[in-house]
Image (cartoon, rainbow, N blue to C red):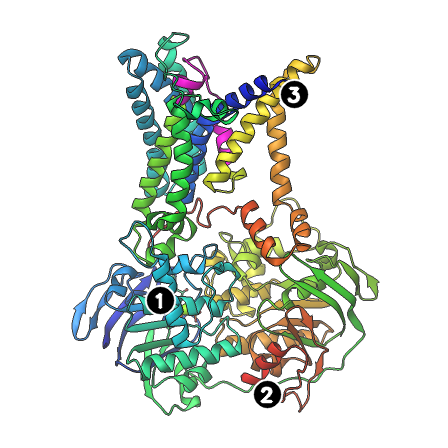
Amino acid sequence: MKIELRDIKKYFGPVRANDGITLTVEPGTIHGLLGENGAGKTTLMKVLTGFISADGGEIRVDGKPVHFTSPAESIRYGIGMLHQDPLDFPPLKVLDNLLLAFDNRLIPNRRGARRVLKELSQRFHFSLDPDARVNTLTVGERQQLEILRLLALGAEVIILDEPTTGISAPQKVLLFATLRRLAKEEGKSVIFVSHKLEEVEELCDRVTVLRRGKVTGHLEVPFRADQLVQLMFGQSLPKSERPPVTLGEPVLELQDVTVQTYRLTVPHVSLTVRAGEVIGLAGLEGSGQRLMLQACVGLQKPSSGRVLLGGQDFTRRSYRDFLAAGVAYLPAGRIEEGLIRGLTLTEHYVLAQRDHQPFFIDWAAATNGIQKKINEFNIRGRPDTPVEALSGGNQQRALLSLLPPALKLLALEHPTRGLDIESAMWVWEQLLARRRSGTAILFISADLDELLERSDRIVVFSGGVMAPPHRRGPHLGRGTGVFDRGREAGSVMCDA
Amino acid sequence: MNAVLLIRTLASVVRGATPLVFAGIGETITEKAGVINLSLDGTILLSAMTAFAVAYTTDSVILGFLAAMAVGALMALIVAFGSITLRQDQVAIGFVLTLLGAELSSFLGNPFVRLKGPSVPHLPIPYLADVPVIGPIFFNHNLVVYLGYALIILSWLYIFKTQPGLKLQGIGERPEAAFARGSNVNLMRYVYTAVGGALVGFAGASYSLSIKLGWSHRHTAGNGWIALAIVIFGGWHPLRVAFGAYLFGGLKSLGSIFQRVAPGIPSQFFNGAPFALMIVALLLVSSGWLDRLLIRLPTRVRRVIHDSLLGAPPGGLGRVFVKE
Ligand SMILES: Nc1ncnc2c1ncn2[C@@H]1O[C@H](COP(=O)(O)OP(=O)(O)OP(=O)(O)O)[C@@H](O)[C@H]1O
Ligand SMILES: [Mg+2]
């Protein structure tokens, strides 16, 4: 099916999210949509699928003009979309999620749906348990379920909005194989939205680059990376450097720590983190790295073992005590856990002040303070902007800007998830600069390149078990199989 | 206590809990769709009064019930209109309606206070009522109680076993995703809020025409709040909500028995005890303590117990859905 978008316009107040975008997607191709954070990619795809209505422009399917008022209507034409955050029903079962796509029956056809699920799963080598609840699946599996749902509904055009953000490396390999197969063997069109150059280079036949709501270029394979960067950011990016740092005293020591929850047990972890050191925690999502990180900042109480902070025993101390001792934690869910929906940047600034504050808030000083941060951290927003109106990259910038200046230990989950290269590089510059004043950094990431590039040591988790840390060095390359313990985690590193 | 007395007590628990079953399941349906109707206490009062007034005036119990259901649905529609269409706060609207319902019922019901009116006739089910123990406890009541049984089963079947029920869960769980799959989220929310409200109205009628006959000021006050608590206690699951209603009824009559045994203790203690016990029960199921216990069980058993004890509120509860 051929899709033509002509002069699409969508404004959010003063923001021109889409400012006259024209592009054509040919059948049987994988079409990349590349652009920095806030370029307008998601908006354009939501317009195409009827999720939001455009302020201007025309959509043609196989030459005929169409007008979708809801996603249900666009799927009837065979256009389906996977959202950045899978748009499914987490507490329901896989089978029920699939059934919810269908209509017009009183008693759902569970047996039929089970069969469809099984056939499609086999065709694409997915393994989904029909009776599992969706909130127990990984993001990658939830995507697979969404793909199956769209295929079951007869989608001819499948749009994926940044599908690789939350999934593991093997899942990514499987996803790419699936997409190629859909396009090349089954003649479907795939629109692949991303801000990652390598992925677009690896997968796409053609690519359209967006920048600030406008098309800056259409390219065909083979792409030139520097050209893509130029189109995306309007400039070429400098190489990021890694300033050498001499490691200091141990900041954090875990001595035979065991953490237990209802789902998972992480047994007997021992680890010493020294001042200025960067340690990456790798492994499939849900393998225990998050529990461990939370134990390091006092959000999980270990059931045995000791946690030392600067030589002092902090084992059963509260999160507040950890904070007071110079620890900070940035969770993965920025808007859910890190920021407070509905409050403005200024209000966040006030809340973030840790030292003694007067009873009445000095708003003028707070506005000044946050304005300085906004300039310094290059946040696209104003002091009175509510945080949820910021784009993902700017939310992350805001969080970083609110961290106290001197820290002993900084724990981060997915510090650059969803950020474009420029923002990601910028974030790491800020983080690495902190090392010079002796801050140790612990971070979780699903991005292999990020782990390899940024960490001094990498710790791999697999099913709750931690492999001994590996030093950074020439042997820490891809496919070397140095991660002998934990087969899954090993394959994460090897398959990439 | 002898067996006859025990059976009679259990029978009265079953009968007495029936309005809570209707109100609890009605509210469950509303909340499953993602709307909180907090006006239950006022709605039950107003519909109880309406039911009695209509039945008294027309001498028709059926008309009484129908009028009460209409009142319940109307109150619910005000909540729906205020929250869905006007996008106002559901909790605030619910509170205002609670107060309004209570005051209106006292004002409009004044002429009907302490009159003797019609009631739902007693109707033992042939054969079943003669089964020893079970018969007198469950099948020696009136039609309202039996309809309660039917509602428990039908609502469970509807929500979990039918396609429209699945969609109902969908719109309450994640309205955006339901919209993407073609549901008319806001229309459905209107419908289920009204249906839930009608059931709450039925609960009100079943007080004044069956369980606590007649009308007086603040005749049923407090029961709406209990029904709301039971929905949470029941984890938004009709079977557990019904269980909660019966449990609460049981605790209450246990209280009155103890009161007879130990008349020295003030009656307020026994009136308050069921609430305290429900809170303890809620704490037990929702604290981490249960998790720690479950770790020791095999995975399969763990999953089943976890699913059946812990109910989470619908993900989109109280959240207005707006298409971008
Ligand atoms: N509902 C909304 N209300 C106001 N502004 C919005 C809304 N949705 C998007 N925007 C703004 O429109 C612009 C484009 O956003 P969009 O989500 O399309 O970007 P994107 O290219 O998908 O970025 P990312 O890579 O961060 O996902 C941004 O400046 C964003 O802040
Ligand atoms: Mg986006």
How many neighbours does mark 3 have within 10 angstroms: few (below 14), some (14-19), or many (20 or more)? few
Camera-near label (3 vs 1) is: 1
Which kind of residue does numbered mark 1 sit on?
A: Val
* Percent x, y of residue A303: 75, 58
* Percent x, y of residue B72: 35, 29
Determine whether B269 is above or below A23 in the image.
above
Same chain, labels 1 and 2 = yes
How many neighbours does mark 1 have within 10 angstroms: few (below 14), some (14-19), or many (20 or more)? some
Q: Chain ID for label 1?
A: A
A304 or A131, which is in the foreground? A131
Q: Quadrant of ligand 1?
A: bottom left
Distance between the alpha carbons at the discs numbered 3 and 2: 70 Å
* Residue A404 appears in the rendering: no
Residue at the farthest left position = A64
Task: Kindly identify which residue carries mark 1.
Answer: A116
Task: Kindly identify which residue carries mark 3.
Answer: B269
**In the rendering, which numbered label is found on residue A478?**
2
Write down the region rendered in magenta. Answer: B206-231
